[in-house]
Image (tube, grey):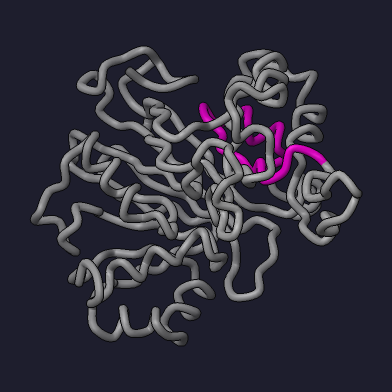
């Protein structure tokens, strides 16, 4: 069956679907040096898209846990061994050059899969970063990956029924630009924005407001790195200054959208939550707050229909 928020259908009845392959922040959980934290395991944020009629599969983000995530996708929709690259992935889409979003590309190299021409879609700065810096440049030079260009605000058709629309979002861009994606079919559309600095900066950039974006999509997977301020402080009030880590706080996002109709709020799925974020635990008070206010928390294994569903 489809996961929370999806139409209640069997897999065979959903010709084109999104699969949540991970919902954590870049480093997942537990994080290095904190192996006994006791919380639920998190894999870094990634989505898979399966177009069954086209026999195609797409991966959004190449995380450090790409091996487990591709295996999970294989279990749902077995790969076509004739797909270029040899892994049954018709395309890998990157959002930006922070560790949880592209380090998995290393698994396409000669030390691992030894892929042949795996298609990787990237924006100009992201592609240039990969071409110009090892070990990523070796993947290009040896033909393990084929970099394909994307452009801000330009539709990239992929199959007869599926295409993506990348758009630049405000975020820390030390090595590359950062993009979100509209995942588009003739029936439904989803938006994927796992990382951005703030909704205010988003508004100032002159595109859609968050409210306008929600009005024209069916599913929205958006940045939920931190639930609220103070999350990185210990009981003595010591820890990292969160003002230096600008992500929209989940509480603030919910407050901003509180007056929207219930069917609009239900479109929003919080994703990319840090190991310190109480949303990590489905039984937490924070998770209950999200549900009570009419929103959703993306969980690994969730599935949502983009075509053929209600």
In the visual, does 243 lie left or right of 82?
right
The quarter of the displayed image where residue 104 is located: bottom left
Range of the magenta residues? 208-228
Q: Where, quadrant-wise, is the N terminus in this rendering?
A: top left
Q: Residue at x 26, y 46 (%)?
A: 71
Q: Is residue 203 magenta?
A: no
Residue 222, x across and y down, in percent: 61, 40
Q: Where, quadrant-wise, is the C terminus in this rendering?
A: top left
| Image: 206 above or below 38 | below
Q: How many labels sit on residues?
A: 0
| Image: 307 above or below 206 | above
Identify which residue, 58 or 66, lies in the foreground: 66
Q: Residue at x 26, y 37 (%)?
A: 51
In the visual, does 85 lie left or right of 60?
left
Identify which residue, 278 or 167, lies in the foreground: 278
One can see residue 233 in this view:
yes
């Amino acid at each position: 069956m489809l996961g929370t928020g999806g139409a209640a259908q069997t897999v065979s009845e959903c010709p084109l679907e999104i699969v949540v392959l991970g919902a954590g922040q870049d480093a997942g959980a537990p994080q290095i040096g904190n192996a006994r934290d006791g919380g639920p395991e998190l894999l870094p944020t990634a989505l898979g898209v399966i177009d069954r009629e086209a026999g195609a599969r797409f991966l959004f983000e190449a995380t450090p846990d790409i091996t487990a995530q591709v295996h999970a996708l294989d279990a749902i929709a077995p790969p076509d061994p004739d797909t270029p690259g040899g892994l049954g992935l018709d395309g890998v889409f990157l959002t930006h050059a922070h560790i949880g979003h592209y380090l998995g590309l290393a698994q396409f190299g000669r030390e691992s899969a030894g892929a042949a021409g795996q298609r990787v879609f990237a924006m100009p700065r992201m592609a240039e970063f990969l071409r110009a810096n090892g070990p990523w440049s070796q993947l290009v030079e040896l033909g393990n990956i084929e970099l394909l260009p994307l452009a801000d605000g330009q539709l990239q058709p992929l199959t007869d029924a599926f295409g993506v629309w990348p758009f630049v979002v405000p975020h820390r861009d030390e090595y590359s630009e950062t993009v979100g994606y509209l995942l588009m079919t003739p029936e439904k559309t989803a938006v994927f924005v796992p990382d951005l600095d703030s909704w205010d900066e988003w508004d100032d950039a002159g595109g859609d407001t968050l409210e306008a974006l929600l009005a024209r999509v069916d599913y929205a997977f958006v940045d939920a790195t931190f639930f609220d301020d103070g999350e990185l402080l210990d009981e003595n009030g010591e820890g990292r200054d969160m003002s230096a880590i600008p992500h929209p706080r989940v509480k603030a996002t919910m407050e901003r959208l509180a007056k929207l109709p219930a069917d609009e709020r239900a479109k929003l799925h919080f994703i990319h939550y840090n190991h310190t974020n109480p949303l990590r635990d489905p039984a937490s008070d924070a998770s209950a707050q999200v549900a009570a206010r009419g929103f959703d928390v993306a969980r690994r294994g969730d599935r949502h229909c983009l075509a053929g569903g209600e």
